[in-house]
Every structure is written in structure tokens, then in C-alpha cells.
Image (cartoon, rainbow, N blue to C red):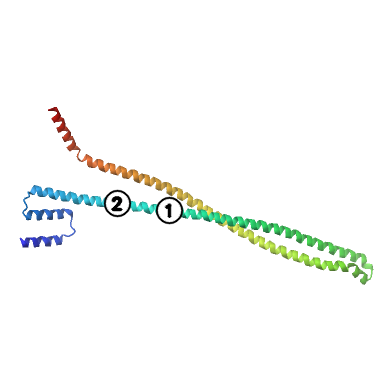
Amino acid sequence: MVARRHKKKSAKHRNRGSSHDSIANKIIHEIINAKYDITENEANLVKDALNYSTETRTMTSLMKRDLESVTSSIFKSRRKLIEKKVSVDILKASIKEKKDIVKKASSYVSHMKTKLTNEKIQMLNTQKNLLEITKAIDDITKVTSKLSDADADAATYGLKASLIAKEANSKKAEVQYNSTEKLTNQAANRHDDAVKALEKIERSFAHESSNLKIITDNMKDAFDTLTNTYNDVKDLSLSLLDEAFVLEKSSQTADTDTLAAQ
């Protein structure tokens, strides 16, 4: 008896990890060898019960694992959708920021253009005054050409002194105008760059917003389909299990009808 049990233990050690059928057979073998008051038919019923229990656990374990996998994918998809929404919101905020930059740049360009126009007018006026006084000196010089040099110089002395000041003013106005023109061009370039950056981010926002809407709609359809499919599978599973006993129910109904007829 001891040797037999030792042999069974060795066999169990060799077959570790075998199928549930082998496990059930070993259990039945041990029950019979223990000389319980149990028939072979009863032992087979125990074996069937063990097999069905193991099969059921295996099947439900696989179903649970698959359901957990789907659940994990659902949460993962939700997180990705939230990340997509956050990304679109960031782009939306960036557009507002870029619009503010463009607005300020546009206002500054407008200011610089007005300043440039005023300085151009001032420069032209100084040039006009310079030409006028230069012409006056030339005219006086022609008129006093027959006078002595001293008299001619005396006649244009005041105008020539004024000429020096007007030349300085004209030169100053020209330098100021050129400087402002350079600043205006730089401001215009910065404004153009800001507009391009805004247009680029607006295109990106439009693209991402469109994708977000499509993804959101697709996910809604997917979740609706998942819910409906799950309900269909659940209903079908319950129906199939119920229909497995349809013959028994028919027999019971027939017996009931026979008894009622008697």
C-alpha cells in the first residue's frame, strides 16, 4: 500500500502541469484505491463534475482576461482622447497669444509709418527751405555782381549764415528720416513674421480640431458598438445556455400535458 502511494506521488510529480483531465483521473484513481464505497458510475459522475468545473473556470478566466484587456484599451483610449483635447486647447491658447502679438505689431507699424510720413514732410520742408535760401543767395549775388566784393558779401552775409543752419537742419532731418525708415521696415518684417506664425498655428489648430472631432465621433461610435455587442453577446450566451436544455423542457411539458390529460 505504501509502495503504491509512493509510486502515485512520483507519477504526479512527473505530470505536473498536465491537463485537467489527467488531474481528474488522478483524483478518481485515489478515490477508488482508497476503497470508498463508490461505484465506477459514481466515480465517473465525480470525474465529469470535476472536468466541467475546471472547464468552466478556464473558460470564464479567459473571458475575464479578454474583458480586462478590452477595459484597459478603453481607459487607454480615453486618456489619449483627453491628451488630444489638451493639445488642442494649448493650440487655442497659443492662437490668442499670437493674435495679441500681431495686434501689437500692427499698431507699432502703423505708428512708425505715421512717424515716417511726418519726418518725410519735415525733411522735404528743410530741403525746400535750403533750396529757397540757396536761390536767394544766387539771385542776390547776380544782382550785386557789379558791386565791390565787400558790398556783395555784406548783401549775402546774413543769408549765408542762415544757409549753414538750414543745411544742418536738412542733413539732420534726412538722417532722422533714414533711421525711422529703417526701424519702420524692421517693424513691418516683424509684423509679417508674426502674421505667418499666427497663420501657421491656425492651420495646425484647424487640422487638430478636425482630427479631434473625428476621433471623438469614432470613439462614440466604437463605445456604442462595444456596448451593443456586449449586450448581444451576453443575450446570445444566456440564450444558448438556455437552449441547451430545450429538449428537457419539451419533455417536461409533454409529461405535464400527459398528466393533465389523465
Image quarter of residue 101: bottom right
| Residue 155 percent location from the top left of the image | 91, 67
| Residue 214 percent location from the top left of the image | 44, 48
Q: Secondary structure at mark 2?
A: helix
For disc 1, the neighbor class at 10 Å (few under 14, some 14 to 19, many from 20) is few
Residue beneath disc 2: 66
Using the rendered image of the protein, determine whether residue 169 is visible from the camera's viewpoint: yes
| Residue 255 percent location from the top left of the image | 14, 33
Disc 2 residue type (three-letter): Asp
Q: Is residue 146 left or right of residue 6?
A: right
Q: Secondary structure at mark 1?
A: helix
| Residue 139 percent location from the top left of the image | 89, 63
For disc 2, the neighbor class at 10 Å (few under 14, some 14 to 19, many from 20) is few
Q: Is residue 223 above or below residue 132?
A: above
Disc 1 to disc 2, C-alpha distance: 24 Å
Closest to the camera, between mark 1 and mark 2, is: 1
Q: Earlier in the sequence, mark 1 or mark 2?
A: 2
